[in-house]
């Protein structure tokens, strides 16, 4: 069961900003430790529910497989099939699920709903993507950067929408002391409150944050270039948004400005030919499928830490 004095929720990645490097190292150890996964079962006897209001490939499969590998039972709850949002409130759903489960992951439209689910649950809640945050993605992304580059030569560069994926990438990057330069079109800047939070973290870690509306400026000498789709889930009616992103495609001409060993990153799914060309996403610099795999290892570390902290520490001592 959960060994924290108070249950911990992961709603945005800065909820775990202090633990993030250790959570990542744990995940890397688990991924590379041959046979460890066969003997280490910290979620034995536990059930982890996952609620989805939006589609998912990576998040759903990585949670289902990851929970199983840790000895737990994953239970996927698609929003069409449950009472939440129809005849039952978030508060009552949270109270009921807390009687059955040991943890809940939640992919939702409105971030306030994730906050409410966490507030009314007595078990740990993990945000599996909301309109504001995607913390599990950021944990996997920083794990991927750590695996490929112990020290990022040059900054982490974001080109595209100032969206949920960027918010947590920024918070995670500055928490780990990496400089970030981001280019968004005018009107598609990140959420101002999140930028304030990132600035406060960077005062502690010494990371620099640079914002621009010029993709070339953001990627010049970058060690990492990251982008995401221009129109996120839930924004499908904002078709006009596409026009704002002219000049924001990651293509060979743009990446020529980066460090030659830069990493290309994308949370996926990618709209090839829109925000990134095939030449870039299929190039030797691209680590997008490592990012996808690392979703599972990162979440295994998070789930163990949040649901069975003693086992998380024991693993660190043993392996
Ligand atoms: N990156 C990500 O969250 O992918 P899914 O939408 O497939 O879960
Ligand atoms: N920004 C995208 C990420 C998908 C994984 C969205 O929210 O749709």
Image (cartoon, rainbow, N blue to C red):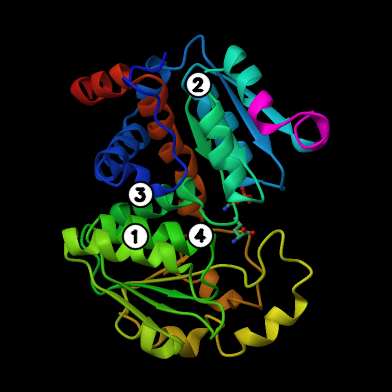
Residue under label 2, please give it.
122
Mark 2, ligand 1, within 8 Å: the answer is no
- Say which element carries label 1: helix
- Say which element carries label 3: helix
Measured Cα–Cα span from mark 1 to mark 4: 15 Å
Q: Residues within 10 Å of mark 3 (few under 14, many from 20)?
A: many
The mark found on residue 197 in the picture is 1
- Say which element carries label 2: loop
Q: Check the image and report above or below for 194 versus 298.
A: below
Q: Residue 25 lies in what quarter of the image?
A: top left
Q: Nearer the viewer, residue 317 or 187?
A: 187
Residue 6 covered by magenta stretch: no
Mark 4, ligand 2, within 8 Å: the answer is yes
Q: Is residue 266 visible?
A: no
Q: Check the image and report above or below for 3 versus 87.
A: above
Measured Cα–Cα span from mark 2 to mark 4: 27 Å
| The C terminus - image quarter | top left
Q: Nearer the viewer, mark 1 or mark 4?
A: 1
Earlier-in-chain disc, 1 versus 3? 3
Q: Residue at x 69, y 79 (%)?
A: 241
Earlier-in-chain disc, 2 versus 3? 3
Q: Nearer the viewer, mark 1 or mark 3?
A: 1
The mark found on residue 165 in the picture is 4
Cβ–Cβ under 8 Å for marks 2 and 3 = no
Residue under label 3, please give it.
14
Q: From which residue to which does the magenta span run?
A: 80-93
Earlier-in-chain disc, 1 versus 4? 4
Q: Nearer the viewer, mark 3 or mark 4?
A: 3
């Amino acid at each position: 069961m959960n060994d924290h004095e108070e249950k911990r929720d992961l709603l945005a990645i800065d909820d775990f900003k202090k633990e993030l490097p250790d959570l990542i190292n744990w995940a890397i150890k688990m991924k590379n430790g041959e046979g460890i996964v066969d003997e280490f079962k910290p979620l034995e006897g536990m059930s982890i529910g996952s609620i989805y209001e939006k589609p998912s490939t990576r998040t759903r499969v990585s949670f289902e497989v990851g929970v199983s590998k840790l000895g737990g039972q994953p239970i996927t709850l698609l929003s069409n099939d449950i009472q939440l949002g129809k005849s039952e409130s978030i508060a009552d759903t949270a109270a009921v699920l807390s009687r059955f489960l040991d943890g809940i992951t939640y992919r939702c439209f409105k971030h306030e709903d994730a906050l409410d689910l966490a507030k009314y649950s007595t078990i740990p809640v993990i945000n599996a993507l909301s309109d504001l945050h995607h913390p599990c993605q950021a944990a996997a992304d920083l794990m991927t950067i750590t695996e490929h580059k112990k020290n990022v030569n040059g900054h982490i560069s974001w080109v595209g929408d100032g969206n949920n994926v960027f918010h947590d990438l920024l918070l995670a990057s500055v928490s780990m002391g990496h400089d970030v330069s981001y280019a968004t079109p005018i009107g598609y800047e990140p959420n101002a409150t999140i930028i304030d939070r990132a600035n406060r973290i960077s005062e502690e870690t010494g990371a620099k944050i640079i914002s621009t509306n010029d993709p070339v400026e953001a990627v010049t000498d970058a060690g990492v270039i990251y982008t995401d789709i221009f129109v996120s889930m839930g924004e499908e009616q904002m078709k006009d948004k596409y026009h704002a992103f002219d000049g924001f495609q990651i293509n060979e001409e743009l990446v020529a400005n980066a460090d030659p060993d830069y990493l290309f990153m994308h949370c996926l799914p990618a709209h090839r030919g829109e925000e990134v060309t095939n030449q870039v996403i299929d190039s030797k610099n691209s680590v997008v499928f490592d990012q996808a795999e690392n979703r599972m290892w990162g979440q295994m570390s998070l789930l163990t830490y949040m649901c069975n902290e003693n086992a998380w520490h024991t693993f660190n001592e043993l392996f």
